[in-house]
Image (cartoon, rainbow, N blue to C red):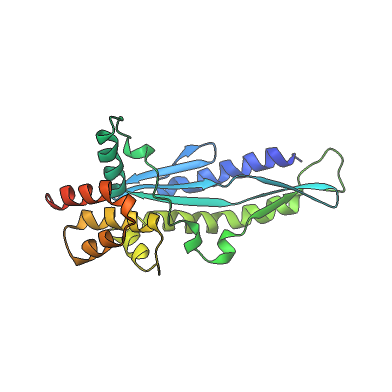
Amino acid sequence: MVGTDSALRRLTREAGKLLLPYGFEGSEGMWSRVVPGGVASVGRTRTLRTWTDGQQVLRFGLCLSATPTAWWEFHNWRNARRGLPPVPLEQATGPGLLDERGLPADMTELWSLGVDPSQPGRHALQADIDAIRAELPRRVHAYARRALRLLEPDHYLDELLTVPDPRPAILEAIVVLLADRGPGPELDDALSRLPEQDTSDYLVYARSRTAVV
């Protein structure tokens, strides 16, 4: 028998081991894989601590992100303009617009890890541990595949283009990713829809990028 925090650490390590066959590496609840299309990451969410009937319950799940190479290139281009050092691809982040919310609802529900009320010493409830462990392989597979799929050619961009009435952050990412394709009416339209205060960097980048594509 183990406490809830120890059980959480063990389950996190098990998730990391399950991610190894997919090419993800890391520790401390965050694993990543660099592919030609960018960097994919799968991690453990922040732990929520709640109380039910006087007993603490830990709630947590998995999360994912994908950073397309084109987005990383744009940020390093902007860093250079601002006199900042480049960021290695393996450390790239953003745009943070597509994640696990593209998965079925049952894959994104947080797990609950409670305390066994029949045991002294605040031991984790074995039934909760077993239930989470049984779900881990299926959920890890779904998260790893989703993160990697977002980095397949044009996949991230194509998903963003389906968003109705996109907010400025989405438009910015669309401009950057379209610029990687080269000039065209879609890029012109995206640039025209950017808020005026956002156009400078994105317009200059798009023009410089499309000039060499």
Q: Is residue 128 above or below residue 24?
A: below
Q: Residue 8 occupies which quadrant of the picture?
A: top right
- Left or right of 120? Residue 42 is left
In this view, the residue in front, 77 or 100, is 77
Q: Residue at x 69, y 50 (%)?
A: 129
Q: Residue at x 26, y 59 (%)?
A: 191
Q: Is residue 167 above or below residue 129?
A: below
In this view, the residue in front, 191 or 145, is 191
Residue, far left = 211
Residue, far front = 196
Q: Position of residue 102 (x, y in %)?
A: 47, 63
- Left or right of 63? Residue 203 is left
Q: Is residue 212 above or below residue 13?
A: below
Q: Position of residue 193 (x, y in %)?
A: 30, 62
Q: Residue at x 22, y 47 (%)?
A: 205
Q: Position of residue 186 (x, y in %)?
A: 23, 65
- Residue 46 makes an appearance in the image: yes
- Left or right of 130? Residue 79 is left
Give the quadrant of the N terminus. Answer: top right
In this view, the residue in front, 80 or 28, is 80
- Residue 115 makes an appearance in the image: no
Q: Position of residue 38 (x, y in %)?
A: 32, 47
